[in-house]
Amino acid sequence: MSTIETTTGRQAPALADQTVLVTGGARGLGRTITEAFLRQGAKVAVGYHESREAAEQLAADHPGRVVAARADVRDRAQVDALVARANEAFGSPVSTVVNNALVGFSFNGDARSHAHEIGYGEFADQFAGTIQGAVNVVQAALPGFEQLGSGRVINVGTNLFQHPVVPYHDYTAAKAALLSLTRTFADDLGPRGIRVNMVSGGLLRTTDASAATPEPVFDAIAESTPLRSVTTPAEFADAVLFFASPWARAATGQNLVIDGGLVKN
């Protein structure tokens, strides 16, 4: 197994030696992330909620390297079963988790709830999918991380709470909380060799979730960036690979914004 020595003395596996869990990994951005790991030789457990056909097709296209299992990330028992399925199928613990699942949300500015009308139930729904989901996934993966002596958690965030091009109140609040969780979990889990980071894009051009965004909105965002472009799912996935790789061995508690320079951390 190819490894690089970490600052804590533990070994960080190369991407080709990793078992990766991607929640919501069968479609949209999640599928792009799944395929990026597969190109690097990793084995991938694809968690899905409603995209059964797409998930099973991925498994059929990559026999022995993809296992697909349904799990609602808000349900701890289902997440435990998903992780157990991955560990059993690949014969080794999950070494990296990507918290990508997005529960019931579409980036449609015309249909969003405005400040004068939004109810707390909409916030609660997003917090359940984003925060409860991430906590469930990390905690389910911890025994495997402990066995390996290291682990990687990569949370999918957004730049919208730093630059609200469109004020999606519920989604943005949940992702801001996920950044806080990223930093506090990094502090708590770091002594165990577990690194917790976030990759934040803006509206990506294009995913299933952003398909409802009008092209003029994308064009306006592009004109506001130094690179004059809107980040693609493939470009976003590159940053996820970095945090999963041995080259990010000294990085934890970080939020890497991948948006063409619109937001500067």
Image: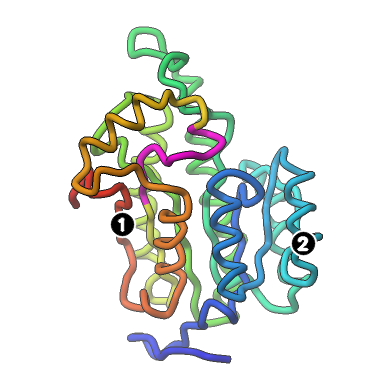
Query: From the viewer's perspective, is the residue at label 2 or at label 1 nearer?
Result: 2
Left-right relation of 257 to 96: left
Residue at horizontal 36%, vertical 33%? Answer: 173
Up the image or down, 14 lies above or below 229; here it is: below
Residue at horizontal 72%, vertical 38%? Answer: 50
**Which residue has dot 2 on it?**
61
Residue at horizontal 74%, vertical 74%? Answer: 90
| Residue 256 image label | 1
Expressed as whole percent of the image width and height from the top left, the position of residue 180 reads 33, 48
Residue at horizontal 77%, vertical 44%? Answer: 52
The outermost residue toward the top is 116
| Residue 63 image label | none
Up the image or down, 66 lies above or below 261; here it is: below
Give the residue type at disc 2.
Asp
Taking the magenta stretch, the answer to whether it contains residue 202 is: yes
Which portion, as a residue range, is magenta?
200-210
